[in-house]
Amino acid sequence: MPRITGADRVSKKLAGMAGERTVRMVGQALFAGGEMVRAEAGRLITEGAVSGKHHVPSLPGEPPNEDTGTLRTHIETTQPAPLRVEVSSNAPYAAYLEFGTSKMIERPYMRPALARKKDEVVALVRKAVGKAVKGA
C-alpha cells in the first residue's frame, strides 16, 4: 500500500520533541485524514455501480464496481499507534482487486483514494502541527 513519503521520519521527530497534547492533536488529524481516504475509497467503489442482476464488473485498471457491498463495508480506519493510521479492507478479496493476480488485472481503489486525498490529508496534519507548535 502506498504511503505518504517521509511520514515515519516526521513521526519519529514529532514524537521525540512533542508533548502528549501535540501527539494527541496530530494523531487526531491523522485519523481524520484516514477517514477521508476511507470515504473516498468507498465512493470510488460505488461510483456508477449497479448491484444484482444488472451488475457490470469494472474494466481492468479501474476501481471495482460494487455488487454486494462487502468490499466497501469492510474498509476501516485503524490507529495502531498514536502517530500511525492505516486504512484497509478486510474483505477476503480486497488485495486481489487492489493489486491484481496472475489471471486478473488490478482494480485499484485504495491507491487512487490516497492519491486524491493526499494533499488534503497533508494540509490537515500541517494545520494540527502548526496549532500544536503555537500552543506549546
Image (cartoon, rainbow, N blue to C red):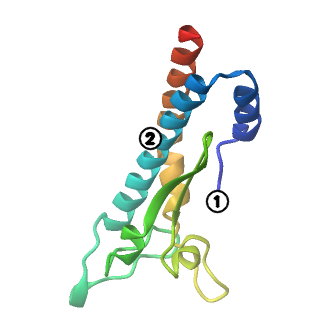
Quick one: 69 or 81, which is closer to the camera?
81
Q: Which residue is mark 1?
A: 1
Q: Quadrant of the N terminus?
A: bottom right
For residue 96, above or below residue 8: below
- Tell whether 54 sits left or right of 20: left
Q: Residue furthest front?
A: 20
Q: Which amino acid, mark 2?
A: Ala
Quadrant of the image occupied by residue 125: top right
Q: Is residue 51 above or below residue 113?
A: below
Vertical arrangement, residue 24 with respect to residue 50, above or below: above
- The residue tagged 2 is 32
Q: Tell me what residue is drawn at x 38 percent, y 68 percent.
A: 72
Residue kind at label 1, given as amino acid type = Met
Instruction: Identify the secondary structure beneath mark 1.
Output: loop
The quadrant where residue 100 appears: bottom right
Residue 29 locus on image (x, y percent): 49, 34
Residue at the image point whose x is 52% and y is 54% from the top: 78
Q: Quadrant of the C terminus?
A: top right
Query: Label 2: few (<14), some or many (≥20) within 10 Å?
Result: some
Foreground of the two, 73 or 47? 73
Q: Which mark is residue 45?
A: none
Give the Cα separation between the discs numbered 2 and 1. 19 Å
Left or right, 41 with reference to 90: left
Question: For numbered disc 2, what is the local secondary structure?
Answer: helix
